Image (cartoon, grey):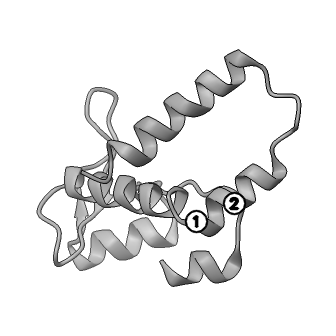
Amino acid sequence: MAFLFLARPTVINLGVLSPLPCTEVYDEAKAAGTLVGDWSVEGSPPFVKLPWIEDVSQLWEISAKMDSRFYSHPLVLIGMLRHAPLTLNKRQLRAAWRFFKNKVLIMDR
């Protein structure tokens, strides 16, 4: 997480790795036995299991918490305000508040 604050990006998008077939990551995970699931029309995409993770929902939860920590950091908030246009209308302000409430306030619980 410290790297994100040193790099100072304006936005981040964290997720769970779902390696595609015939890629190096897919082949390595399959060979190591850490690939959980496989690609199919009905099923969910596969993921690479980490030693400290029980299932994919934990990975998504960690991703959401990191998202929340990043966007609630004072330096990031100040940077977002600095780059915001001065002519925000009521609709944009409501959308920003909903985003902040959902991403930051709810996820910190």
Residue 13: image location, x then y, percent: 56, 54
Q: Residues within 10 Å of mark 2 (few under 14, many from 20)?
A: few
CB-based contact (under 8 Å), mark 2 and mark 1:
yes
Q: Please give the name of the residue rendered at 52% of the width and 35% of the height, measured from the top-left corner.
A: 99
Residue at numbered disc 2: 78
Query: From where the camera sits, is residue 89 visible?
Result: yes
Q: Please give the name of the residue rendered at 52% of the width and 83% of the height, measured from the top-left corner.
A: 2
Vertical comparison of 40 with 24: above or below: above
Quadrant assignment, res 78: bottom right
Q: For this rendering, which residue is in front, 86 or 26?
A: 86
> For numbered disc 1, what is the local secondary structure?
helix
Residue 15: image location, x then y, percent: 45, 54
> For numbered disc 2, what is the local secondary structure?
helix
Q: CA distance from mark 2 to mark 1?
A: 6 Å
Q: Residues within 10 Å of mark 1 (few under 14, many from 20)?
A: few
**Relative to residue 107, is residue 98 drawn left or right?**
right
Q: Which mark is residue 20?
A: none
Quadrant assignment, res 4: bottom right
> What type is the residue that disc 2 sits on?
Ile
Q: Please give the name of the residue rendered at 24% of the width and 51% of the height, measured from the top-left corner.
A: 109
Residue 83: image location, x then y, percent: 83, 51
Vertical comparison of 7 with 15: above or below: below
> What type is the residue that disc 1 sits on?
Pro
**Relative to residue 12, is residue 59 drawn left or right?**
left
Q: Please give the name of the residue rendered at 35% of the width and 58% of the height, measured from the top-left corner.
A: 65
Query: From where the camera sits, is residue 19 visible?
Result: no
**Relative to residue 63, is residue 10 drawn left or right?**
right
User: Looking at the image, which residue sits at the far left?
Assistant: 54
Residue 72: image location, x then y, percent: 50, 58
Q: Which mark is residue 74?
A: 1
